[in-house]
Image (spheres, rainbow, N blue to C red):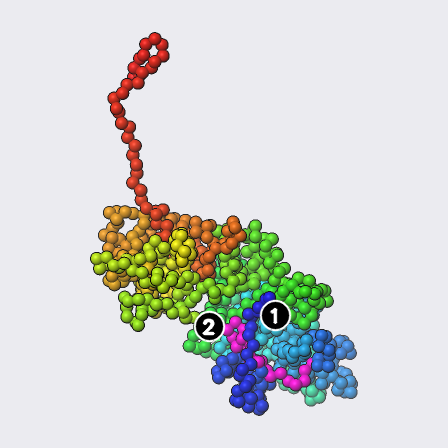
């Protein structure tokens, strides 16, 4: 049974007395509400359910008692497009309407007023027995937008999309959205619809369009934006300047207005002045729209900007087009599938990660690092052919066929269909990864890289990643922190689970194996040295000028042993973090190796960690480099232990160690079982690892050192054996013929 995690609905706040009072007097304001920590998208002063979508809490309006469709049988309650009266079809402009007799015009005032109200406040209707709310933008998209197949269908995925978008617009802290989408999800049409919707009610404003190339931006403008505008009803559409179907710029002159008796009969100064609002597109480039003020910027296919164009550089420029000082005056609607990482996907991934409210913290101004809010809707929510007539996805294969939104019967669940297609591509890594990127079920799928770009077996890595995602990971990985007992250093180390801890563990040793230390001549040695080892990529400087710097990384790995309580050849600990000071990191490392009683192989080109261990009496935990005997070590290596990372031989051995481990312990094995490598961050780091720029991959460095430490016997130097012939003085004879002869 599919369990949806896209959104959660909260209703506890509705029991509060202050919420009830504010609802009674309609005092809730559109925008961010600090008291409830939610963005209210209601425009009628009420507050109903709060939807939590990817870290953003969104307050909907309170459901009214009477909504559209209540007189229809439950099974027939679906979204029904509001038809335009046929007698209005021939009316193209407001001037045509003015020529009608007054008694004819009187018939349409209420209809037109209702459409304006729905455009602004949104629309409620009954759906299979439940009240369903559409934002004004979503209503305009469904009821008044023409797309390539005619009118759009109502889909649950788009309802969530428009809630999120409306919240981005309502939140004064937000610059808009960064939408990680799947192919054919309708984003280009929804963005075009919103562009026209906002432009036709805005004065002295500019709306811009960018895509992965200038020709793509132009195509979106001419094939989507202009036709949508041309098909607007006369009461929404301002008079436009120039051509009816322009190629470069759409300019509105007379504003769309609510039609009343007074507005019909009187010509106002506003009507004569016009909107002075334009929609245009630009060629793709880092400095597109530089120096211009935009009310809305549509960024289509932003995950496909290839060199020399850079979406990160462009966003730094266009972000300033949406602000005046500290005030955000415009919004960006950005959406795309992702190319492979080296073809624009890497920059888009960074922008998406910097926008993800579920993973990052806001700055003191309440903004994300990018200023945008990230949204990802898995493919199963919006896959053609698997949407029922109510707009819901058919996740699981039904017992009986279900009627689809296209009136066709649905026999198979979308998840099963997707898995069948993915299984058919498992023999072709690049084709499978492209399929994942186009139709992702997870963010990791969306940013899959091409197999040919990795020195490791990406097929096995991604098999393991997929396997881990399908498991209930809380049962396999525990997050937490290590602490000295009672806060007294160099005593016993204790493990404390905590959701914000820096350590992730997949195995905790039995109590009798914890803190197993052997003391010889005042030096402490690991008591479980034959059961596993740690690898560490350290750092020496606590902070940098820009607050950056690479992370410190620590990995624990068990050896292949027959010990009944120790899982063989399994990564048991992952630590990738950069605490406020290097000393905190050093102490974290020390507590981990003491708790497990296992040795550590660390890079010695950053020696502060190794000095820290020596000063505290733990030199015995620091392994010497395994490829040299003690008498071949340098003075510093004999003093501190560790291994250099500058040697080409070490680099190659390190990469080979990871490669070998992946082949033998990651992904699907010959017996059909998957490996026990449960740390996603390390797997993703392996997938991106570049041996020529290895310093960026902290998790790969430390995990590779852990593998080398556990396989240290493979690197031990062996003395060359020389074989020397010994002459015992015996002569050899040729015994052919009648006499023997000595062989010279």
Q: Nearer the viewer, residue 580 or 658?
A: 658
Q: Is residue 66 magenta?
A: yes
Name the residue at 67% across, 85% down.
Answer: 66
Q: Secondary structure at mark 2?
A: loop
Residue 528 shows in the view: yes
Secondary structure character of the magenta stretch overall = loop
Q: Is residue 373 magenta?
A: no
> Horizontal and vertical percent for residue 458?
49, 53
Name the residue at 42% across, 54% down.
Answer: 568
Q: Residue furthest left?
A: 521
Are the two marked residues, 1 and 2, in contact with CB atoms closer than 8 angstroms? no
Q: Which residues are magenta?
A: 49-68
Q: Nearer the viewer, residue 362 or 227?
A: 362
The part of the image, by quadrant, that contains residue 50 is bottom right
Depicted 330 relative to depicted 216: above or below: below
Report how far apart the C-alphas of labels 1 and 2 lie in the structure: 24 Å
Horizontal side of residue 539 vs 458, given as left or right: left
Horizontal side of residue 702 vs 676, given as left or right: left
Q: Nearer the viewer, residue 363 or 239?
A: 363
> Horizontal and vertical percent for residue 388?
68, 68
Name the residue at 30% across, 58% down.
Answer: 526
- Name the residue beneath numbered marker 1: 157
- Name the residue beneath numbered marker 2: 368
Q: Earlier in the sequence, mark 1 or mark 2?
A: 1
Horizontal side of residue 69 vs 179, given as left or right: right
Quadrant of the snapshot with the C terminus: top left
Quadrant of the snapshot with the N terminus: bottom right
């Amino acid at each position: 049974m599919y369990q949806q995690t896209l959104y959660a609905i909260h209703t506890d706040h509705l029991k509060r007395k202050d919420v009830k009072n504010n609802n009674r007097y309609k005092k809730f304001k559109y925008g961010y509400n600090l008291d409830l920590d939610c963005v209210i998208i209601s425009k009628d002063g009420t507050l109903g359910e709060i939807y939590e979508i990817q870290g953003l809490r969104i307050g909907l309006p309170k459901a009214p008692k009477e909504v559209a469709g209540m007189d229809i049988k439950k099974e027939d309650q679906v979204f029904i497009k509001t038809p335009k009266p046929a007698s209005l079809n021939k009316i193209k402009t407001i001037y045509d309407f003015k020529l009608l007799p007054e008694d004819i015009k009187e018939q349409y005032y209420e209809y037109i007023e209702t459409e304006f109200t729905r455009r602004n406040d949104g629309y409620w209707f009954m759906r299979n027995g439940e009240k369903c709310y559409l934002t004004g933008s979503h209503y305009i998209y469904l009821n008044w937008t023409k797309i390539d197949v005619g009118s759009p269908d109502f889909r649950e995925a788009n309802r969530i999309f428009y809630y999120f978008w409306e919240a981005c617009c309502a939140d004064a802290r937000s610059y808009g959205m960064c939408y990680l989408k799947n192919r054919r999800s309708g984003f280009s049409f929804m963005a075009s619809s919103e562009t026209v919707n906002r432009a036709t009610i805005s004065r002295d404003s500019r709306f811009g369009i960018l895509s992965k190339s200038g020709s793509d931006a132009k195509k979106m403008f001419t094939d989507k934006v202009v036709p949508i505008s041309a098909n607007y009803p006369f009461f929404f559409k301002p008079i436009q300047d120039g051509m009816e179907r322009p190629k470069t710029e759409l300019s509105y002159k007379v504003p769309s207005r609510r039609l009343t008796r007074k507005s019909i009969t009187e010509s106002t100064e506003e009507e004569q002045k016009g909107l002075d609002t334009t929609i245009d597109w630009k060629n793709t480039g880092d400095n597109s729209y530089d120096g211009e003020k935009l009310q809305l910027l549509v960024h289509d296919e932003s995950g496909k900007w290839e060199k020399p164009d850079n979406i990160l550089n462009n966003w730094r420029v266009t972000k300033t087009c949406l602000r005046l000082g500290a005030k955000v005056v415009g919004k960006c609607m950005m959406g795309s599938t992702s190319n492979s990482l080296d073809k624009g996907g890497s920059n888009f991934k960074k922008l998406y990660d910097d926008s993800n409210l579920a993973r990052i913290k806001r700055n003191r101004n309440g903004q994300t690092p990018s200023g945008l809010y990230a949204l990802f809707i898995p493919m199963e929510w919006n896959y053609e052919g698997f949407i029922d007539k109510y707009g819901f996805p058919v996740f699981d294969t039904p017992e009986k066929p279900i009627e689809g939104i296209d009136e066709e019967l649905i026999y198979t669940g979308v998840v099963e269909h997707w898995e069948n297609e993915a299984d058919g591509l498992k023999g072709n890594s690049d084709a499978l990864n492209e399929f994942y990127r186009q139709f992702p079920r997870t963010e990791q799928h969306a940013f899959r890289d091409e197999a040919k770009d990795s020195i490791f077996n990406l097929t096995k890595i991604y098999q393991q990643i997929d396997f881990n995602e399908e498991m209930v990971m809380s049962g396999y990985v525990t997050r937490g922190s290590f602490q000295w007992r009672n806060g007294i250093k160099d005593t016993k180390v204790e493990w404390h689970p905590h959701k914000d801890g820096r350590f992730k563990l997949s195995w905790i040793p039995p109590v009798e194996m914890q803190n197993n230390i052997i003391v010889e001549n005042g030096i402490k040695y690991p008591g479980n040295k034959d059961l596993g080892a740690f690898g560490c990529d350290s750092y020496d400087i606590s902070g940098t000028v820009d607050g950056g710097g690479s992370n410190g990384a620590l990995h624990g790995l068990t050896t292949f042993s027959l010990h009944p309580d120790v899982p063989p050849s399994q990564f048991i600990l992952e630590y990738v973090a950069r605490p406020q000071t290097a000393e905190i990191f050093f102490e974290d490392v020390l507590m981990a190796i003491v708790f497990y009683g296992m040795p550590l192989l660390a890079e010695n080109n950053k020696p502060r960690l190794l000095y820290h261990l020596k000063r505290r009496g733990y030199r015995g935990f620091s392994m010497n480099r395994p490829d040299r005997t003690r008498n071949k070590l340098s003075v510093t290596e004999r003093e501190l232990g560790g291994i250099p990372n500058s040697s080409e031989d070490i680099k190659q051995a390190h990469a080979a160690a990871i490669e070998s481990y992946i082949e033998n312990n990651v992904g699907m094995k010959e017996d059909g079982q998957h490996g026990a490598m449960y740390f996603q961050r390390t797997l993703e780091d392996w997938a991106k690892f570049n041996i020529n720029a290895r310093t960026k991959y902290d998790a790969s460095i430390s995990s590779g050192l852990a593998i080398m430490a556990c396989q240290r016997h493979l690197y031990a130097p062996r003395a060359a054996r020389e074989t020397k012939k010994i002459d015992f003085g015996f002569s050899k004879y040729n015994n052919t013929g009648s006499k023997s002869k000595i062989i010279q």
